[in-house]
Image (cartoon, rainbow, N blue to C red):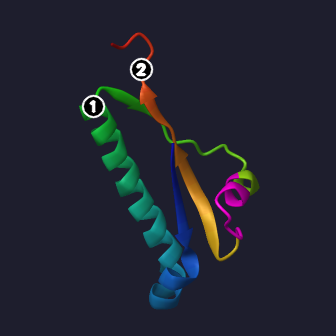
Amino acid sequence: MFVITAITNRTEFKYGPRGFRYILMEVGHVCQNLYLGAAGLSLGSCSLGGFLDRGFDKLLDLDGYIEKTLVVIPVGKLKGGD
């Protein structure tokens, strides 16, 4: 399970209102590379957008405001795989 978090204030301080957009673009790139790495190892992966934000923030000891969970990506063996 990969959980991607961000401290948005850092990027928004430097880039202003566009900062959050840049964060989301980077998260997309990370997800794509995780997909490719998983596929290369014959594993499955899937980004989850519907998760309990506060649950993951609490699990990872994040405050949910300064640092927050953005996406969760489980990676594992494919059904019917070797």
Give the extent of the magenta segment. Answer: 56-64
Q: Is residue 59 magenta?
A: yes
Helix, strand or loop at disc 2? loop
Crowding at dot 1, Cα within 10 Å, few <14 / some 14-19 / many 20+, comes out as: few
In the displayed structure, does residue 59 sit left or right of residue 41? right
Whole-Å distance between the Cαs marked 1 and 2?
11 Å
Q: Which amino acid type corresponds to the residue marked 1 in the rendered image?
A: Leu
In the displayed structure, does residue 20 sit left or right of residue 65? left
Q: Residue at x 30, y 26 (%)?
A: 42
In the displayed structure, does residue 57 sit left or right of residue 71? right
Look at the picture and state if 13 lies above or below 57: below
Query: Which residue is label 2 attached to?
Result: 78
Helix, strand or loop at disc 1? loop
Q: Residue at x 51, y 84 (%)?
A: 10
Q: Residue at x 66, y 43 (%)?
A: 50
Look at the picture and state if 13 lies above or below 82: below
